[in-house]
Amino acid sequence: MTSDNPKRILILTADAGFGHRSAALAVAEALRRVYANLCIVDIANPLNDKRVPAFLRDSQADYDKLVRATPELYRLGYETSDTATVGTLIEGALAMMLSNVLYDLVEKYRPDVVVTTYPLYQSPLHGMYSLFRARVPLVTVITDLVTVHRVWFHRRCDLCVVPTEAVRNLALEHHIPAHKLKVVGIPVHPDFVRRDQDKAAQRSALGWRPELPTLLVVGSKRVGNLRDIMRILNHARLPLQLAIVAGGDKVLYKDLAGMEWHVETHLYQLVKNMPTLMHAADCVMSKAGGLIVSESLACGLPMVLVDVLPGQETGNADYVVQNGAGEYAKDPIAALEILYHWIDQDGRQLIERAQNAQRLGRPHAAHDIADLIWEVAARSQSAA
């Protein structure tokens, strides 16, 4: 194959939270960097099609609101749907709602491989293939570390990329053949690959104090208690520097911008240079989302987890805590205590947590997944 006949790769994702699209972008960037003009990569969100029922289309925009306002209701829905009977009904309904949309996407892009970073497309794709007697190889990329909904696992996928051995075992329990499973990690943007640069120099370049231990705080509309934690840290007199990213939460950003800060603080609304910020930080405070956890571990940064969504994020938090790469703070006082112990005694605990985080991190996952996708494309070409 030459650049005159590039492979076409279609990545399907959704915008319910940041993680699914970020994983898609990470894989796409790795494919473009490694295979350059040998492939054409397209990213599409089938849920944005106007033919998709409004409740399903709008669920993306309502995701943050639902999770933050009624977390127990979300947990109940998650657990109820993660059963064989209900799961089968959901898959049948999804096939009816999405098959035509997916067929048109496949017809439009004519991909050699379809990759999905969102769990709701596999059954509709299979239904579409059966109905129209046309099939394209499918690669599934799972975006949570331990607790994974059964809808992610579909036996007709050609390859299922899982982040951990725990998810591999779960996939086997759901009858995914072992030869279709690869333990790779959650893909993060290639720029998160750890750089051998001096942190002090990186902080100076950002306008941060180079000599202070630095906590990177990553917020969003889903993290509800950061405001109170920041108030306590602001008055705790810890030898600590704060870099706070509000993550699109305009109310949080406005409140923090109006505070009188007594510690060195750098406040951002939204950023496009998260890898740069992480490479300059010593630890991260955020929720237990699969994306932010994977990015932090890829950079060798221990985590103070301050929000855990019932369901898939429970496993993410357990993974970090049980492997010594972070701790869960149930309230603002607990967050203060964790940070105090981490930086006490010349940062001994912080160093230990960072070593554990680096051991768990998979910074090259996106490139590894890109290679696996390319192998599927090559097999598809050979079979043709």
Image (spheres, grey):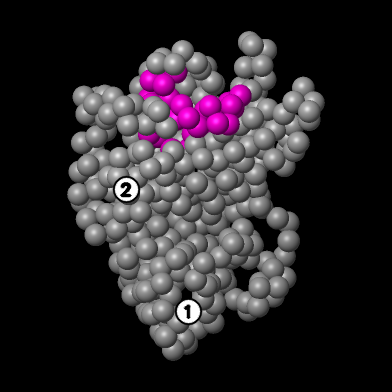
What amino acid is labelled 1 in the image?
Leu
Which residue is at 46% across, 13% downward?
133
Q: Is residue 196 above or below residue 146?
A: below
Determine whether, in the image, residue 181 is placed left or right of residue 365.
Answer: left
* Label of residue 59 in the image: 2
Spot the residue most to the top. 383
Q: Position of residue 102 (x, y in %)?
A: 45, 30
Q: Position of residue 354 (x, y in %)?
A: 55, 56
Give the Cα distance between marks 1 and 2.
41 Å
Q: Is residue 37 magenta?
A: no
Residue 225: numbered disc:
none
Residue beneath the point at 50% across and 83% down: 263
* Res 148 quadrant in image: top left
Crowding at dot 1, Cα within 10 Å, few <14 / some 14-19 / many 20+, comes out as: some
Q: Quadrant of the C terminus?
A: top right
Q: Secondary structure at mark 2?
A: helix
- The picture places residue 84, in percent across and down from the top left corner, at 24, 24
Residue 238, numbered label: 1
The answer to whether residue 182 is left or right of residue 379 is: left
